[in-house]
Amino acid sequence: MRVWAARSALAAVLVATAACSSPPTPAPNPPPVVPAGLSTVTVEVPDALSQSPFDRPRSAQVPAGWTLTVVARVPGARMAAWTPDDRLLVSVPGAGQVIQALPTRQVVLAGLDQPHGLAFAGSTLYVAESDQVDAYDYADGRAVNPRTVAGDLPDAKSPDLRGAYAHALKSVVVGRDGAVYFSIGSTGNISADDRSATPPRATVMRVPPGGGPAQPFATGVRNGTGLAFAPDGSLWTAVNNRDNVADPDGKVDQAYVNDHPPESVAKLTPGRELGWPYCNPDGAAPAGFIRDIQTNADGSKLDCAALPPLEQAMPAHSAPLGMSFTKLARFGTGALVGVHGSWNRARAQAPEVSFFAWQDGTLGPQQTLVGGFQADDGSRWGRPVAAVAGPDGAVYITDDAAGAVYRLAPKT
């Protein structure tokens, strides 16, 4: 299994050969690398599910002795959740639907505004749309009796945004005490007005048990799409940080942008501040924060050195999305994160499913659980979004680029 330290060595080679102007000259393609502990396998695809991109054999990197199988096709598949009666629900924001993908396909909810995050608390299903979070009574494949938990949330239809909203998709989780937490992404790459908006954007919000007005729980969270509760009940987020950041001299240099800033993986506590857009994480975990030269040159906006360091981080522009905690055969308990892969590098950051081991109340370094979605030329045949453990102990992975749901499991 590869950790970030191994990636950083490879990234250093790429940075050294990357262009320093825009548009960048693509870096030379390195030879294929299979992380230690992984094997290259052909993705197993039933004939009935073999439409593009599976109209030709596709290879992936999985733990040795494991298989990766396409078990459903859902165009635009995003977040996933297992129901109390062992059905897999998948959100499809582009279609305004929540789909039952397994064991059979059916539409559970339709006509929604970009539904994204899904969460269960007992028999109650929570759905995060772009403009509100709703709760439904769930039973036997049906979600009924909707009620709004948090409304009037910002999206592209908000009058003050006038259609300009880059991070409208929202995630939702429910705590042990019944409090509901959801993400509100930033309007754009640098949009400091988000911090004073009503409700504030670039936050993780909390609705108290039993309902009530949502209040900020954590701030400076540029796009905390990954939200999950750890085994000890703590709330964690995986964050997409900013693009095209200037180096310490104030220059937007591609060689610097390639690896700055790292993506955040953080434990959220009441009032935690993750810095955006005035502070950026810097370096390997535990990553401290440095001033953003473009927004906080003199440090007057926010004292970055006073922010607690991140518990973990990912390489810049990884674009982490779905996050969940589970216990895996061979690997133990940890966090699964769907790494979508992003664009803001001379060579695109590769998509994968990552695993962070749960160790003594915190997360260990990033390891690759599933890779191989990106070719040496930077082209991709798939982009994982979310990974959740199923009732059978296997991991089920959504992929919005391939329009697929995969089952990852040891060979039996």
Image (cartoon, rainbow, N blue to C red):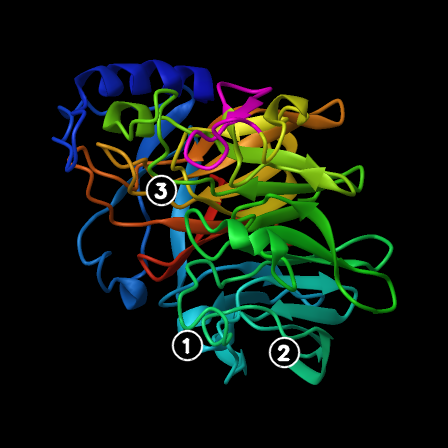
Q: Secondary structure at mark 1?
A: helix
Residue carrying label 2? 141
Residue carrying label 3? 341
The stretch of residues the image draws in magenta is: 282-299
Q: Secondary structure at mark 3?
A: loop
Q: Secondary structure at mark 2?
A: loop
Foreground: 393 or 224? Answer: 224
Q: Residue 294 lies in magenta, yes or no?
A: yes
- Seen in the picture, residue 126 relative to 60 is either above or below; the reply is below
- Give residue 158's position: percent from left, percent from top: 51, 74
Residue mark closest to the camera, 2 vs 3: 3
Foreground: 24 or 402? Answer: 24
Q: Residue 307 lies in magenta, yes or no?
A: no
Q: CA distance from mark 2 to mark 1?
A: 19 Å
Q: CA distance from mark 3 to mark 1?
A: 23 Å
Question: If you read the primary sequence from the N terminus, does the residue marked by circle 2 or circle 3 appear first?
Answer: 2
Q: Give the amino acid at mark 1.
A: Ala
Residue carrying label 1? 95
User: From the image, which quarter does the N terminus lie in?
Assistant: top left
Where residue 372 sits, quadrant-wise, is top left
